[in-house]
Image: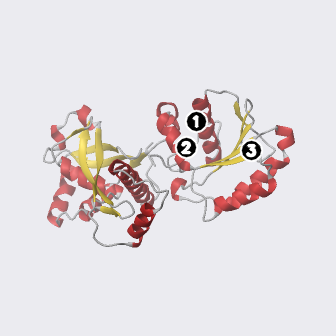
Amino acid sequence: MRHSFSAEFLKILPPATNFGEAWELLCLHLLRVDTSDNTFFRLGPPDRGIDILRQSTGAAYQCKSSEQGIMGKIDPQPCIRSLQRAIEAKALLQWKDYSIALNAPLTGDGLAKINDFADKNITLSTHVNILAPEYWDSLCQKYKAIVEHMFDYRVHVSEAEVIEAFRKARYFDRFVDQAVRQIALSPLNVNVSNNRTEILLSIPFSAELTVEQLLDVVKSLLGVSLDRRMFSEFGTSCAPSLSMTVDRVAQPFKKKLSELTPDQLAKLQLFIQLIWREEKDKEDSPDKMYFNLQRQSPNWVPATSRDRGRLTLDRMETTIQAAMWQSITNRGPRQNSS
């Protein structure tokens, strides 16, 4: 996912007074713009199990959130209690469909528990939908210009983290000591985005260090691995290729940051290209054996190379994005700027 709907990045803007309300407001904005329908409105107290109601269609929405965003989990029991209250208020509010808007995955068998409760307590003509974080992520990408003011994805990196990143990238101690001196003598704060998430790193660096050295630091901070990953169920593998770009143009690794113009420095981006390939059959792993059995099924339609490539790239992108969000989350609370 490109977005993490966590308390670290989603702003609490008026009229919201807490994180839960900030999540409701984001959902409200996205629903209105995606449908071009202004009949969506938030329901105030008392709690009737519904946060947002669409008057024109009777669609009801309950918003549930975790302050950890996609790195968190949501317990199904509060969702079920809200659904119960909504059922009790159904005659009053005249809602027809019910959706639960989540900013994090449900725990374990949470989906099954919600569906089981709905099956036992709601008529067949009423639908209960789970709108997972991926749904809202796609809408945020589609309407970025409209909702980007509701987020702040800047991550302010400390000098100590930069030095540790150099060490993780296996730079010699002599170079690390020299880098410390260069950061002190010719400091340069660099903002680096990436093409896979909305994270924007603000890094204390030096104009005398190179593009390659900046790339190594960013790669380490974001937890991006260059290891090739096998996807035996598809018979493929994939690995990332990294470059530091300006307007999608890769910059020479040996170029010093002092050689870049202010405009170029403002547009630095870690560009992560995913390169996949078909793998020759070597051993029949359990996944590969299952894949082969599926192909032998009478109803199985053999996947084309293009299909396998698309599935591989989608899976690899999800893996890399999760690693990046995990890396940022693991570093602890970010340092907010004034």
First in residue order: circle 2 vs circle 3: 3
Quarter location, residue 21: top right
Which of the two residues, 183 or 316, is positioned nearer the viewer here? 316
* Residue of label 1: 30
- Asked whether, in this view, residue 239 is left or right of residue 26, the answer is left
Nearest the viewer among 58 and 196 is 58
Between the residue at mark 3 and the residue at mark 1, the CA separation in whole angstroms equals: 17 Å
Among the 4 quarters of the image, the one containing residue 169? bottom left
Residue 278 appears in the rendering = yes
Residue behind mark 2 = 136
Estimate the spatial distance between the alpha carbons at disc 2 and disc 3, rounded to whole Å: 18 Å
Would you place residue 194 above or below residue 55 in this image?
Answer: below
Percent x, y for residue 78? 71, 57
Residue occupying image coordinates x 73% and y 60%: 116
User: What's the residue type where badge 3 is placed?
Assistant: Ile
The residue located at (53%, 51%) in the rendering is 6
Residue 65, disc: none
Residue type indicated by callout 2: Trp
Residue for badge 3: 50
